[in-house]
Image (cartoon, rainbow, N blue to C red):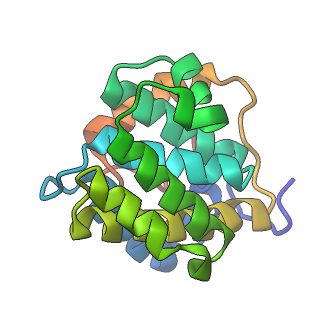
Amino acid sequence: MAHIDLKNELPGIRGPMAFSPSTAKPLNALAEVLLRDDDNTLTRGERELIGTYVSSLNDCFFCQNIHGALAGHYLQADMAYIDAVKKDYVSTTISDKLKALLAIAAAVQKGGKSVSEEAISQARSFGATDKEIHDTVLIAAAFCMYNRYVDGLATWAPSDRQFYIDRAPRRAEEGYIDFDLYKNTVS
């Protein structure tokens, strides 16, 4: 049970967003730009994977599973692959550039001042642009906020990971703005 009465039965971040539509709007707008904007050289799947990885570091069950399912949808990968990236991305088949960006995201998750010049140089050596580094830092920082929002209010999350996999194609199609967030259903 959530720490406050959210006046709905929605899981994860959807509950507090439906409770406070005025704050939901800018939070969703930020997610839309960071994760779906087409003016980006990182794919939607790569950006979702960054958010998934940070959410796993923060132990936010809802966020790491919904965004992991989205990453899997975009990357045409199953949850076992996403789980492998979360557990030990260095040993996976993702690009060296994405590995370097995940290292930056992990540093941001610890604290902004944990991002080192060495980590930035490493990412650049694998071809990361300033925009990709910028977006990685902002995605990681935003997901720390989103994760703390979800878990700080003790929202509930479906334990069956298939729920997230089933939702991913719909969320990928609708995005973070153009969906009926306030519909009081679990689907």
Q: Report if residue 144 is visible in the image.
A: yes
Residue in front for this viewpoint, 116 or 143: 116
Q: Is residue 9 left or right of residue 51?
A: right
Q: Residue at x 23, y 68 (%)?
A: 131
Whether 37 is drawn above or below 94: the answer is below
Indicate the position of residue 62 as horizontal and vertical percent values. 66, 44
Q: Residue at x 55, y 28 (%)?
A: 91
Q: Report if residue 183 is visible in the image.
A: no
**Quadrant housing residue 5:** bottom right
Q: Residue at x 29, y 50 (%)?
A: 126
**Quadrant housing residue 58:** bottom right
The mark tally for this picture is 0
Q: Is residue 43 left or right of residue 109?
A: left
Q: Residue at x 59, y 58 (%)?
A: 106
Indicate the position of residue 121 as horizontal and vertical percent values. 37, 66
Indicate the position of residue 4 as horizontal and vertical percent values. 82, 69
Residue in front for this viewpoint, 65 or 183: 65
Whether 22 is drawn above or below 77: the answer is below
**Quadrant housing residue 14:** bottom right
Q: Is residue 25 left or right of residue 110?
A: left
Indicate the position of residue 55 as horizontal and vertical percent values. 62, 51
Residue in front for this viewpoint, 184 or 31: 31
